[in-house]
Amino acid sequence: MIANYGFKDGSGDWYVTIDTDKCNGCGKCVEVCPEKILEVGPDEFDIFREEPVAFVRHDERKKVRYSCAPCKPGFGEKPAPCAGACEFGAISHSEGWKALYER
Amino acid sequence: MAGIDVGGKNVHIVIKKDGEIIGKGAAPTGIKKAETVEALYDQVLKQAGLMRKDVERVVATGSAAKRVAFANGFIADAAADARGVIKLFPNARTVINVGAEEGRSIKVSPEGKVLDFAINDKCAAGTGTFVEAMSRALEVSVEEMSKIALDSTKSIPMNAQCAVFGESEVVSLIHQKTSKPDISRAVMDAVAGRVGSVARIVGLEKDVVVVGGMAKNAGFVDSLQKNIEMPVTVPEDPDYIGAIGAADAALSSILEEEVKAKVVERESLPEGKAY
Amino acid sequence: MAQQGKPVEFWRWPETNWVNPYIDWEKGKLVTAGVDVGSVSTQAVIMVDGEFFAFGNTRTGSDSPNSAIKGMGYALEKTDMKIENIDYCIGTGYGRVNVPMAQQSITEISCHARGANFMYGPEVRTVMDMGGQDCKVINVDDRGKVLNFMMNDKCAAGTGRGMEVFADLIHVPVWEIGPRSFQISKEPPSISSTCVVFAKSEVVGLLEQGVPENEIMAAYCSAMAHRIMELLKRLGVKEKFVITGGIAKNEGVVKRLEKELGIKTAEQVWANPQYRKKNYPFDTQLAGALGAALFGQALLKMGKTISVKKT
């Protein structure tokens, strides 16, 4: 399941996307996030799933645009810390921040 | 020389002679923008004891700059801000302008040229409109809000990131018996957070000057300073900076300035045709 | 959201309830319920052995627990069933952790997915739900399981609130806006502002210019359809495409959305032919609570119930 956490408003697309089919709940992304917006716990969208999964904390979902900006997702070759830490490629960002560097 | 700044909420006009301001005025833009501009211009001229022909050049700026039918030239808002500020503050390197419908941050060179800028103009939450909407819910004037925010003893984060949802949140905070100063401060902090975030995109280099209508809001300026962790300077009549910059541009005979920009907002709807 | 003391409820969908005359609940084995406490409206659905038994659709008040109680009470009103007769109850929606009679809470994304699957059938692949304060797009499989989703609850534009603000501004009840938006001579350009606050000023401007109200409604519905399109495009729409929540009842938005997408939304009728034959009411706002009641049924049968777990 692809979970998109964040929002879209007049200013653009701001989502942190977690592919729960790839996530095994190891929590490496949680450790490296400087803004502490990630957490590992039971999958609220698939109540029959046994193993825990990573997700964006509820109170952070409406602010991802601002929380993720310092890590500059989509800028240059280096991935954001969370994406870099995940060996399964389960976590990624939408294009919103990328558009900021394109000009 | 005359500079006319037609903003989303207010029109500001400045008339300068030999580098000095000899006339200025402001009025709410309203729906019939062109007419408001004409009327205000005549009024400001009259107060300065001038006629239209006495003004050599008129440069317009602002979101509705093109409504100034008699303008000799136009400059981009960011360029107007940069010019207006650098004259008064030669050490300014960052200009933050928060108006009614737009919030922008501009990196300026020592010569007053725009090096980089970012704007937030599609969402009311990072603008003066947010504060205005909350003031209605609080049943307190914006000026009052600005003052009492400084008396707040508690910092409460606002969950709503939207002016419309924010209004409901303010109402529920009132129901929870949160004090008006604390709510006011929460509102200022919320906008300051978003403005600060936009400012960080172009970088915060001192000196930081804050202009635009919201710069008159002491509560907001205080919250902004805390957010960017830097002191800021606010000029007298910060809402006239755009017009001043436009008048200065008139002096330099600059018609249209190319501005390299980092636009935070993008059009996601086709341009609405005017009725 | 009261403005100048006017009763706000006039601008919201009316309250309704119903009980199934064909089912004798006392003969049933498992009674489950779902309560969807939204920011604007609350629905309670009761199922007997997985069959649609009763529902109540009410307006959410100032606190979630009371809204849940009111909604449940309204659903039970025409029955002789009591709360104690419900074997398992699940809370969902914005106020899900505060549903006093629920043993468990499940996110509305999962519940809407399952509810849409039940209402519209296993061919459903994309569900768009617009509630009072949010909008979500969900891609599902044939069992109503969530494959991916995207939600917006940060920005009022493209939520029920966006429509409410508009209805309040022009003093027209929400259920009239849809039909009236088509009583026009030509389709106007849509409102250009994405932001509800800025759109409001635009509308005021149009009103002052004397633009006919119906045309303004068309312009606003068009803008809202645009907003939804952006979200849908982002996630991708697959047929069968259905809309749940209050906005599904606004044809002004739905038809314009269909036109832009080039995909028709599924007809708003029960997939189950028995339900159609017996004329069970089809209310798009019930999807969440229905899904919740179905989860309750599934969990009970699997023996996976828990005493209290609120996520």
Image (cartoon, coloured by chain):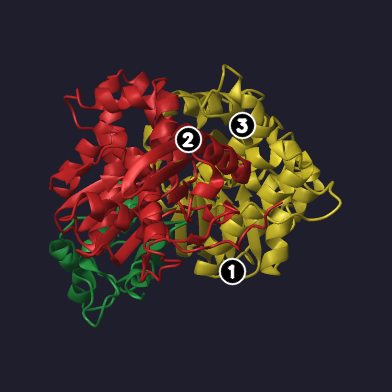
Chain colours: A green, B red, C yellow
Disc 1 from disc 2: Cα separation? 65 Å
Q: Separation of disc 3 and disc 2 at Cα?
A: 71 Å
Secondary structure found at label 1: loop
Please tell me the numbered disc located at residue C56: 3
Q: Residue furthest right?
A: C185
Quarter of the image where one finds residue A64: bottom left
Where residue C174 sits, quadrant-wise, is top right
Identify the residue at image location x=28%, y=77%: A89
The three-letter code of the residue at mark 3 reads Gly
| Distance from Cα at disc 1 to Cα at disc 3 | 31 Å
Viewer-proximal residue among C287 and C129: C129
Bin the neighbour count of mark 3 within 10 Å (Cα to Cα): few under 14, some 14-19, many 20 and up.
many
Amino acid type, mark 1: Val
Q: Does label 1 or label 3 sit earlier along the sequence?
A: 3
Q: Which residue is tagged 1? A: C237
Answer with left or right where residue C119 lies relative to residue B256.
Answer: right
Is B71 situated above or below C165? below
Residue B251 spot, x, y in % from top left: 38, 58
Q: Nearer the viewer, residue B26 or C154?
A: B26
Q: Which residue is mark 2?
A: B49
Q: Could you say which is closer to the camera, residue C278 or residue C114?
A: C114
Whether residue C58 appears in this view of the structure is: yes
Discs 1 and 2 share one subunit: no
- Secondary structure of residue under mark 3: strand
